Amino acid sequence: MTRWIRRGLWALLGALLLLVLAVGAYLQQATPRTDGELTLPGLHAPVRIGRDAHGVPTIRAQNIEDLMFGLGVAHAQDRLWQLETHRRIGAGRLAEAFGPGAVDNDRFLRVLGVRRTAAAQWQWLRSTGRTESLALLDAYARGVNAAVRTLAARPPEMLILGLRPEDWTPVDSLAWAIMMAWDLGANWNAEMQRLRLALRLGGDDAVARVNELMPPYPGEAPRVTVDYAARLRALRLDGRLAGVDAERWLAAAPPSGLDGIGSNNWVLAGSHTTTGRPLLANDPHLKLSAPALWYFARLEAPGFKVAGATMPGLPIVVLGQNEHIAWGFTNTGPDVQDLYLEQIDPADPTRYRTPDGWATFETRQEVIRVKGAPDVVQTVRVSRHGPLISDAGAADDVVDRDRPAYGIAMRWTALDTDADAVGVGLAFNRARSVAEFVAASRGWVAPMQSMVVADRDGSIGMVAPGRVPLRSPDHDLHGMVPAPGWEARYDWIGWVPVDETPREFDPPRGWIATANQRIVPDDYPHHLTSDWTLPWRQRRIEQVLGAKPKHSIDDLAALQADVKSLAAAPLLPRLAAARADHPLAAAAQRALAGFDGTMRADAGAPLIFWAWVRQLTAGVFADELGPLYERTLGTRPYRDALEGVLARDDAWWCDDKATSEAETCAMQADAAFERALDELRERHGDDVAAWRWANALTYRAEHRPFSRVRALAPLFELRAGIGGDTYTVNASRVNLRPDATTGEVFLNEHGPSMRALYDLGDPAQSRFVHSSGQSGLPWSTHYRDLVAHWAQGRYLPLWSDASPRRTLRLQPAR
C-alpha cells in the first residue's frame, strides 16, 4: 500500500512538473519578441522599436507610412486582446466570444450600425481621394496583422475562450473611432430619462418635477418646452414602444456618458508660469480598464516627431506633444443626438409616418452568431432620421394591438459618413502652431471636444470643433425628449457654422481651462446643450490657478492630484445638523469636525459624508421614482437635484409617500444619518477612528470579460484604494449603486484614464502616466507597473534620452 502511495505521489509530482513546464512554455511563446530582428511583409524600409524601462516604445521609421506600420506592430504585440475586443464591440460580435449574455449588446450595436457606418466612411475616403488617410489606415492594419503572424501563441483570453485572431482592417479602426464618440455622448440617455420620468411621475406638474430632478445648469432657467408629459399621454405611450421592452434595450446599450464625471484640461501662457513659456495639463476621465484604454508611444520619422497617448486601433497620437505644440482634450458634451418617435403603420410594420405621408423603412437582416447557442436574426429598420434603436430590445413584450405603435429612431452626427478622423488627427500631430492646429480642427466631426493647445512661440488657445445641429425656432422640445418624427419642425435644419463653434485665444487672464462646464457666454448665438456637467471641478481649477501669479509644472501636477471637493460645501451644514439615535453618532460627528470637503484617501470623514449622501438621496427620491431610481442611478446621481430640494426645503420631495407621516427634509437628513451609520458599521466595524475613505472608494480597472469570473478576476483586473470623489479635480466617480457583481458600494471605475503635463519651453520636463501598464499580458511586469504611479500622482517622462532597454528591428521582406 505504501509503495502504491509513493507511486501515486511521484505520478502527481510528475504531472505537476509537466504542467509547470507547459505553462512556462506557453508564457514564453505568448510573450512577444521585443528585441532582435523580424522580417515582415508590408514594410518599405527598416523600422526600429526601442522600449524603455516601462515598456513605452520609441518607434523610428524613414517615412510616416512605415511609422504607422510600426505602431500597428507595437499595438498588436502588447494589446492584441484589447484590439480583439475593440473590433468585436464595433462590429457587434461579442456574442461569438462570450455567448448568449452578450446578445443584447450585439443587437444594439448592429441596429445602431457602427460598422456599417465605418465601412461607408472608408468608401467616402476612397471616393474623395483622401490618399494619406487611406494609406496610414492600411499601413497600420498591415502592421497589426504582420505582428500577429509572428506570435507563437495566443493571448490567454483567446486561449481560454477558444478564439483565434482575425485580420485587422481599416474599417475596424474607423468603427472604433465611432465607438469612442459613443462613449463621449450621452444626450440620447438624457432624453430617455426625461421621457421615462415624465411617464412615471404623471400629473399636470410632471415636466416641472422632471426639471427638478434634472435641473438646468447653475444660474440658468429651465428651457421652456411644450408640456411633453401631456403630449406623451396623448400619444398613449406607457413605456412600451413598438412592441419593445424599453427597459431592456436601455440596459443593452453600451455605456455612454456619465453625469458629473468628465475630463480636465488647462493651459497657461508664459506670463503665468515660472518658466516664461506655456504649460499645458490634461487628464481625460473615462472608464478604467485593464489594460488601460491608452498606449503611450513616441513616433519619429523625417519631419515628424510626436509623443503621447495612442489608442490601440488608431494610427495617430490622440493626445500629446510634438516639437512645436502640445494639446489636450475634454468632452464638450453638445446635443448631437436626437431621438424621434416614429409612428408605425398598424397595417404594415415596414412603413412609418412622415410629414409627407407613409414611407417605407430601409430594412436589412443582421445575423448574430452566438457561442453555444443558435444564431439570432435581427431585423434592422432605418427611418429618415436614422436607425430604430428600439428594435434592439426584446420582441416578446407586445403592446396592445388597439394602441398606436411607435419606434424610437436616433439621429446622431457620428453616424454621418463624410468624416476623416484619422486625417484630422494626423494634421494635429503635424501642426506647428496654435493657428495651424485650429485650422486642422475645421474637419473634425465627432465627438465635439474642448481642445486646449499651446505653441512654443507662446500662443495659447481653446477651440471646440465638431458638427452640432441647428434646430428650427418652431422646435418646442429643444432636443430634450424624443420628438414626433412625423412633424417636420423637429428635423435638423443645418449645422453651427464651423468657424462659430466655441473658441478663445490668448486671454488677458493668462490661462484657459475646461472641465466639461458651460464654455460659452450668455450671448453665444447657438444652443449647444441643456446638459452641461456641473461646474465644481472647473471652479476648483479656477480657484487654484488664480491663487498665485505664476505656476510651475510641479504646481500643475499638484492640481491634477487635488482632492478638494467644492461640491460638498452646500451639504455639509445639513450633515453637521443631522442627529441619530445611534451608538456611533457622536464619534461620527467628531470625525466630521473640521471637514471641508477634502476627500483624502486616509480620512474617515469622506466615507461618512458619502454614506450619508447615498442614503439621503435614496430617502428623498426613491419613493417617487420607484424602480426607475435604481435603474437611473448608474448614470445620474441626482446631486444637483438633491441640492435644490434641500435649498428649497421642498416638502413634496422630502415627504416619504409610503408613510402616513409627513416627513420634512430635516427628518430625512436624520434618518439618512442613522441608516448610513448602520451600513458603515456593518461594512467597516465599530471603530469610527479606523474608517478610511480608501477602504471603500476602490479603483477597479475592469478586465473584459474576466472581471466577471470570480476565480479569474484577481489575476486580470487592477485595484487600488484612492481618494477624491466625483467632483474633485482628481476625479474618482463615486458609484451610489452597489456593484452588480460584487455588491461593493462606492466602487470607482471611472476617473483620470491618463494624466499629462507638457512644458513648451523644456520638453524634457513633459510627463505622463496612465492607469495600468503598457502590456495586456497579465504575467508581464508591464501589465500593472503604472498603477502605483497613477494612484500616487507620479509620472513618466514624455520624452526619453535614455538608451532603450530592448530594441526590435523590423526589416522589410524582399
Image (cartoon, grey):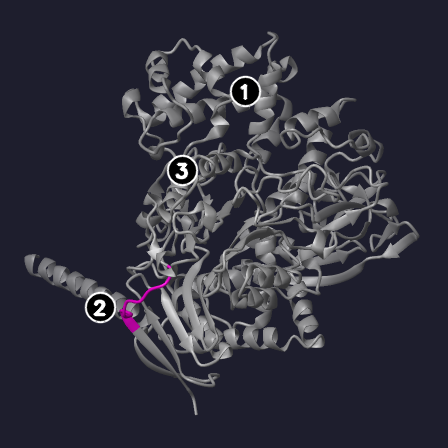
Which of the two residues, 61 or 71, is positioned nearer the viewer here? 61
Q: Which residue is mark 1?
A: 619
What element does badge 3 sit on? loop
Please tell me in which quadrant of the rendered image residue 725 appears. Answer: top left
Q: Few, some or many C-alpha atoms within 10 Å of disc 2 (few <14, some 14-19, many ≥20)?
A: few
Q: Is residue 157 above or below residue 729?
A: below
Which of the two residues, 259 or 353, is positioned nearer the viewer here? 259
Look at 68% across and 76% down and name the residue there. Answer: 126
Residue 159 percent across, percent down from the top left? 39, 65
Q: Which residue is mark 3?
A: 562
* Magenta span: 798-806
Quadrant where the image shows the C terminus: bottom left
Mark 2 residue type: Leu
Look at 30% across and 75% down and name the residue there. Answer: 35
Which of pointers 1 and 3 indicates the residue nearer the eye? 3
Q: Which residue is mark 2?
A: 21
Q: Which label number is shown at residue 580?
A: none
